[in-house]
Image: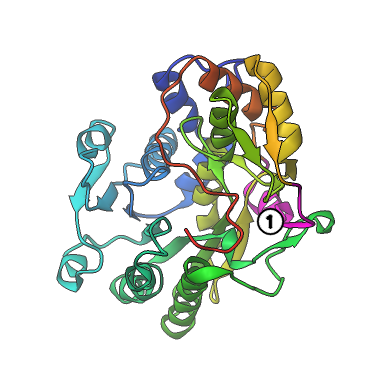
């Protein structure tokens, strides 16, 4: 397979690229003992992450089970089952349901609530901050890789290189604060129950059907102005994020290791839009001006521990421009990356 073809022509080709494991991921899955439970698998990233884990495990000759847990309100169970993922419908806030989940020595925690947070803060805190404790008690004998977000940092200077894992946390808004609550809950139970754990602060994955680049390309294609209130951003090809998350099992620790997962580039919204406009034979129009701060993460530690990305930002921009210009399907789930007050 050519990992970085000049264009991506179909969703089948896209999905196949998203789930292709690196040799390092195959080695990691070969070293890992036992089954994997993925909690909150039905989101944007979960299905391809599960399929990469399946493909890498098979390539490593490891016959493990991979369980995908979610409510499955959108009816995606059949697709996962067809690719060797055993699906389990579950309300993760229901302790009785959680108690019935299968034992497994490896857990990936993807459950979370972002959009709609401002309308129902209580539900946001329950899912983002209470649920981790419930899961840690259920899987107290497991290794856990848990998703977090770069939103826990708050805004940082454009010329500072992005927030590092050791920087002070200054979350803005209830969503970001509840995500810090999630991290603190995982840290507490990691320490008190001696659970080896990794916290993944992801900052904007992109798979052509969603992501910051897709948001920008769609606005340009529609002739809309682009708001420059968040003038810079990070992004990473979702396939690379999948690989980094799976490799994080090699680094789980007590207390938890914290790793930023994003691309190495700090991208200018204006520059990216001008390039997308050229690729799509459109005109980029802007409103506002770039502030001196943005939500940015420093990728250095993650790249050192979990490996470099295979797809550059340049390649991803070209893929997105082609995909959107030819009417490729998108999920209709904007990132709202331009929000600066934390209200999602």
Q: Residue 180: x percent and y percent?
A: 52, 72
Q: Is residue 1 visible?
A: no
Q: Residue 217: x percent and y percent?
A: 58, 29
> Residue visible at 64% across and 73% down?
170
Q: Residue 239: x percent and y percent?
A: 52, 36
Image vertical order of residue 162 relative to residue 99, above or below = above
The quadrant where residue 50 appears = top left
Image vertical order of residue 172 relative to residue 57, above or below = below
The quadrant where residue 297 appears = bottom right
Give the color scheme: rainbow, by chain, secondary structure or one colour: rainbow
305 relative position to 34: left or right: right
The region drawn magenta spans: 289-308
> Residue visible at 53% across and 25% down?
222
Q: Is residue 336 magenta?
A: no
Q: Is residue 327 visible?
A: yes
Image vertical order of residue 28 relative to residue 253, above or below = above
Report the residue marked by disc 1: 297
- Element class at badge 1: loop
**Near-viewer residue (54 or 265):** 265
| Mark 1 Cα shell of 10 Å, populated few (<14), some (14-19), many (≥20) | many
Q: Residue 327: x percent and y percent?
A: 46, 18
């Amino acid at each position: 397979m050519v990992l970085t073809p000049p264009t991506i022509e179909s969703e089948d080709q896209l999905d196949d690229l998203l789930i292709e494991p690196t040799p390092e991921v195959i080695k990691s899955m070969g070293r890992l003992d036992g089954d994997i439970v993925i909690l909150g698998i039905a989101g944007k990233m979960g299905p391809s992450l599960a399929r990469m884990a399946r493909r890498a495990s098979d390539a490593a000759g490891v016959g493990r089970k991979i369980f995908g847990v979610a409510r499955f309100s959108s009816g995606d169970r059949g697709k996962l089952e067809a690719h060797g993922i055993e699906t389990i419908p579950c309300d993760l806030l229901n302790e009785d349901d959680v108690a019935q989940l299968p034992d497994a020595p490896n857990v990936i925690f993807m459950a979370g609530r972002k959009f709609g947070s401002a309308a129902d803060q209580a539900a946001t805190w329950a899912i983002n901050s209470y649920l981790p404790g419930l899961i840690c008690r259920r899987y107290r004998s497991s290794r856990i890789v848990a998703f977090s977000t770069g939103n826990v940092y708050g805004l940082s200077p454009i010329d500072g290189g992005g927030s590092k894992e050791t920087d002070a946390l200054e979350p803005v808004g209830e969503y970001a604060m509840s995500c810090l609550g999630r991290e603190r809950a995982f840290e507490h139970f990691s320490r008190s129950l001696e659970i080896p754990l990794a916290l993944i602060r992801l900052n904007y994955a992109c798979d052509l059907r969603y992501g910051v680049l897709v948001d920008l390309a769609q606005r340009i294609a529609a002739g809309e102005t682009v708001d420059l209130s968040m003038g810079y951003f990070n992004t990473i090809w979702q396939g690379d994020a999948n690989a980094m998350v799976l490799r994080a099992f090699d680094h789980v620790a007590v207390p938890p290791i914290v790793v930023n997962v994003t691309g190495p580039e700090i991208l200018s919204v204006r520059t990216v839009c001008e390039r997308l406009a050229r690729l799509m034979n459109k005109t980029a129009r802007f409103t506002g001006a770039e502030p001196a701060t943005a939500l940015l993460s420093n990728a250095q530690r993650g790249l050192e521990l979990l490996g470099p990305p295979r797809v550059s930002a340049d390649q991803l921009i070209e893929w997105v421009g082609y995909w959107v210009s030819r009417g490729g399907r998108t999920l209709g789930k904007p990132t709202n990356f331009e929000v600066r007050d934390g209200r999602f």
